[in-house]
Every structure is written in C-alpha cells, then in structure tokens.
Amino acid sequence: MRRRSIGVVLTLLVTALLAAGCGGDDNSSATTEETTATGEATTVQLAADPSGALAFDKTTLDAPAGMVTIELTNDSSVAHNVEVEGNGVEKRSDTITGATTSVTLDLQPGSYEFYCAVPGHKQAGMEGTLTVG
C-alpha cells in the first residue's frame, strides 16, 4: 500500500512539473510577441533622383508617432544619405550610391526636417518636411 501511495505522489509531482513547464513556455512566448509588436517601425519610402540630380522624389513625408524608418533608395552613382532633424532628434543614415539605406527613429508628433547631409546637397534642394501625427 505504501508503494502505491509513493507512486501516486510521484505521478502527481511529475504531472505538476510538466504543467508548470508548459505555463512557462506560454508566458515567454507572449512576451516575445509583445516585444516584436512594440518594436516594429512604420516604414516610409524616399528615393534620390536616379539621374543623379540633387533631388529627392518627395519633399513631404507623413508618419504616425512612434518608431519610424525612412528607407532611402539611391539608384544613381552620386552619393546620398538622409538625415532627420527636429524636436531634439538628429540622426543620419549611411551614405550610399546605387543601393538602399535607412534610418530609424522614435518620433513624437510634430514636424521634422529631412535632408541629404552630403555637403552642398541640402543647399541644392535635397530637403523636405516629415510630419509625424
């Protein structure tokens, strides 16, 4: 009788440990999904003039508040980048030719300036306004 009681207790103990292990997996999975969802950014497309002219294809961009990625495509052989500035934020992408680059920022509602920071390009008109709502 005593062996049977020990067997029942061990079975219950193993079952309880397995159930606790399954509950732990569910919690870590929910945390991972939450982190992924809050870590996603809104992507806004921007392109440099493919002929090499010092111009972007847009002078205005719009995005919701939060994480925003500006993806710059530069199909020309002239080097370009994109820098965002305003409301205490200033961040620049890599400078590229014939490629794509991006810059990701955590933005509050308001207006921001974006421009090509290669010397002389902003002055030639490679600039615009990013409105974050």
Image: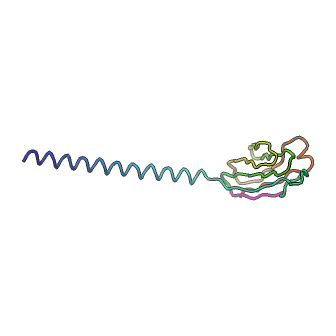
Instruction: Decide if residue 115 is on the left or right side of residue 2.
Output: right
What is the x, y in percent for residue 113? 81, 50
Most extreme residue toward the top, as rendered? Answer: 119
Q: Quadrant of the C terminus?
A: bottom right
Most extreme residue toward the right, as rendered? Answer: 124
What is the x, y in percent for residue 28? 45, 49
Q: Which residues are magenta?
A: 58-64
Residue at 79% in and 45% down = 83
What is the x, y in percent for residue 47? 81, 54
In the figure, residue 132 lies in which quadrant? bottom right
Q: Is residue 24 magenta?
A: no
Residue at 43% in and 51% down = 27
Instruction: Decide if residue 116 is on the left or right side of residue 110.
Output: right
Residue at 74% in and 52% down = 71
Front position in the image: 115 or 10: 10
Above or below, 90 relative to 133 = above
Instruction: Decide if residue 52 is on the left or right side of residue 67.
Output: right
Q: Is residue 60 magenta?
A: yes
Tell me which colouring the rendered structure shows: rainbow
What is the x, y in percent for residue 87? 75, 46
Give the mark count. 0
Most extreme residue toward the left, as rendered? Answer: 1
